[in-house]
Image (cartoon, rainbow, N blue to C red):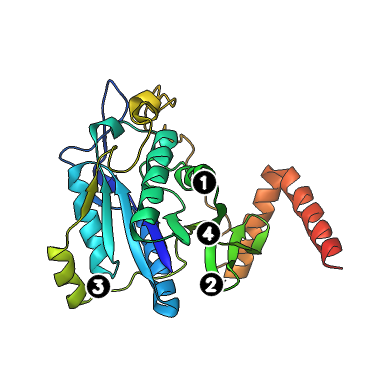
Amino acid sequence: MHIVVCIKQVPDSAQIRVHPVTNTIMRQGVPTIINPYDLFALEEALRLCDRLGGEVTVLTMGPPMAEDSLRKALTFGAERGVLLTDRFFAGSDTLATSYALSCAIKKIGEAWGPVSVVFAGKQTIDGDTAQVGPGIATRLQLNQLTYVAKINEIDEEAGTVEVERRAEGGVQVLSTRLPVLVTMLEGCNEMRRGSLTHALRAASADITVWNAEAAGVPDVGSCGLRGSPTVVKRVFAPTPRAEKAEEIGRAGMSHEELAEAAIDELFARHPTIEADLRDFAATSQEEWR
């Protein structure tokens, strides 16, 4: 089984700066990390290979320094890293990014064998759009399973996968055919510690570096700022709320009494919530019958 994991090197959220003119994130001089959500995707890919055999290719698009994130991924057990870097990719929004990555994934399949599963985190901490994964699936015409909390089973012979997907109404158990793109939720697993063997291999490994031509991107006009219809008009910090916290209940109340007091206060301030909850409970009971 050949698995591709898309990761992104992102600025440390505690030290993000925004360009005052272009309203884009200024990455120079800001410490970077692997997008935390992508680590859950990487761990899930490695676990599948532990169970079923195969190899993991880690892919990222970014400046040359993004090679550090690929080497970090190799220390966990990935077989190879591919860096997509070119001045044509600078300033890409989610549409242009998904286009470039989908071209690279096609090229990876041609170079190292067909790709069965593409993994990604549910979103990135710098953009928070959750659009790149589905965008890749659409361009490659892959089945997509988003917000996945658990992979129950993959049957390579039958070419099927079954997952548990977290939704607003609960947990959905879904099954579809391979190849597939999966975006993983946070907290679904715990990233392993890299072994000394993998760390030594990662330090000396050759990272595959592709520009637009090497990645097989047919239209560079669809990349970078030229291929990005998204326009950021303004970036600003949220306005602090003027309301102050209010104390509910009184000293000496038990946890149960405090909970009841809080619920009573909530229903008193927002009377429609109680009616909505009753309707939801009635509907849920009817569906279970």
Q: Could you tell me which quadrant the C terminus lies in?
A: bottom right
Q: Amino acid at mark 4?
A: Pro
Q: Residue at x 43, y 41 (%)?
A: 98
133 lies above or below 164:
above
Q: Secondary structure at mark 4?
A: loop
Answer with mark 2 or mark 4, whichever residue precedes in sequence: 2
Answer with mark 1 or mark 4, whichever residue precedes in sequence: 1
Q: Amino acid at mark 1?
A: Pro
198 lies above or below 275:
below
Answer with mark 3 or mark 2, whichever residue precedes in sequence: 2
Foreground of the two, 182 or 101:
101
Q: Which residue bears the numbered disc 4?
A: 179
Q: Which residue bears the numbered disc 1?
A: 134
Q: Which residue bears the numbered disc 2?
A: 156
Label drawn at residue 95: none
**Discs 1/3, front:** 1
Answer with mark 1 or mark 2, whichever residue precedes in sequence: 1
Give how far across and how far down residue 155 sits, in percent: 56, 73
Q: Amino acid at mark 2?
A: Glu
- Using the numbered discs, state the Cα–Cα distance from disc 1 to disc 4 in whole angstroms: 14 Å
Foreground of the two, 33 or 284:
33
Q: Could you tell me which quadrant the N terminus lies in?
A: bottom left
Q: Which residue bears the numbered disc 3?
A: 194
- Using the numbered discs, state the Cα–Cα distance from disc 1 to disc 3 in whole angstroms: 29 Å
